[in-house]
Each structure stands twice: as C-alpha cells, then as structure tokens.
Image (tube, rainbow, N blue to C red):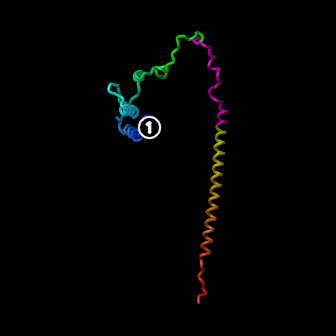
Amino acid sequence: MSAITQNIKINWVDLISDTIVRAKRYDRGHLPYPLLISLICVYKGVDVTGEKHLSVLRSHEIEESALHQMGFIRQGNLFVRAEDDIAPEDGASAEEDEDIPMPHPTNVAGPSHPSQEYSLESISRQIADMASMQQSRMDDMMAYHALRYDAIDNHLKEIDDKLAKLYVPDSDDEP
C-alpha cells in the first residue's frame, strides 16, 4: 500500500505472476507468499539479517511448532493469535462461571433430514421452475428468430424487386 501512496512504480502483476509460474514449474520452486513478503520487506529497507527463515515449498505443510513460533496458540481445534485469546477475567462473577443446564440435544431440533416427500416436492418444484424458465427462453429465441427471418425475407424481396427493374429482356423483334 505504501508503494501506491508514495508513487513507487512496481509491476506487481509481473512479479507475482513470475513467482507463481516458477513455483508451479519447478518442483523446488518457492511458494510466492513468503517469498514476496521477504522481498517487500527488503525493498522497503527492513533489516532481515537476524530473522529466521524457512524455504516453503509446495510439499511442505505448516506444523504446530511453526504456528507456536509465529505466536499462535491452540484453542480446541483452531489456532488463534495469543493476543486474540479470550481468557477469563480475574473479576468474573460467580454467575458467569455457573454451568447452564442445556436441553437434551436429541429432542431440540427434531429430525435432521427432511422427509422424503418434502425433498421430492422441493425437487419437483425446482424442476418445474427450471422447465418454465427454459420454455420462456425458447419462446423468446423463437420470437427473435421469426423477427430476424421476416427482416431477412423482406430484405431479399427488396433486392429481387430492384434486380427485376434492372433486367431488360432480350427482344426478338430486332430489325
């Protein structure tokens, strides 16, 4: 963004495109995102001499240790930034900590799958809607073709009339 605001001319499209093409062509080609971030930092004058870096390839996966090094922590089956972690406050009231009784989950929402009749009705209604849309589209196309056919037919008749006026029959009565 600062390159745009400071009128620094960078052909980002070529830079990203070339990097992606290299990553796709070569098996050991670096993926563009960390490479571009590094290049942007170097371009902007950020000192990256003491920074740890890892060449990220297509075959690599991000492991949990790498996420921990980046400052992410596990919450359930998700990773969140340590700053975004919602920790219970020290002054939380006892009311908030109480367990709230929950209704039994099997009787709350009813059956999870709609009945077969409902789904068949829904499908048949959707098919009928699609058929009516297709029919209206076909009617529009037929009306357009009929209009174009009439216009071309009239144009050809006009050409025939003009040619008929130009035609001079050979006369057998020549002296």
Q: Residues within 10 Å of mark 1 (few under 14, many from 20)?
A: few
Which quadrant does the C terminus fall into? Answer: bottom right
Report if residue 166 is visible in the image.
yes
Numbered range of the magenta stretch: 96-122
Outermost top residue: 94
Q: Which quadrant of the figure contains the N terminus?
A: top left
Q: Nearer the viewer, residue 40 or 28?
A: 40
Task: From the top left corner, tell me how far across and down residue 105 is, in percent.
Answer: 62, 19
Q: Residue at x 66, y 48 (%)?
A: 136
On the image, which quarter does residue 170 sit in? Answer: bottom right
Name the spot of residue 51 as percent of width and height, x first: 34, 25
- Residue 135, position in %: x, y? 65, 48
Between residue 162 and residue 128, name the one nearer to us: 162
- 98 lies above or below 63: above
Image-based side of 113 in relation to 42, left or right: right
| Apparent side of residue 3 relative to residue 114 in the rendered image (left or right) | left
Residue at 35% x, 38% y: name it. Answer: 26
Return the residue at label 1.
4
Asked whether 121 falls inside the magenta stretch, the response is yes
Q: Is residue 128 above or below residue 51?
A: below
Q: Main secondary structure of the magenta part?
A: loop
> Of the residues shown, which amino acid type is indicated by label 1?
Ile
| For residue 72, side relative to residue 95 (left or right) | left
Residue 17 showing in the rendered view: no
Q: Is residue 149 magenta?
A: no
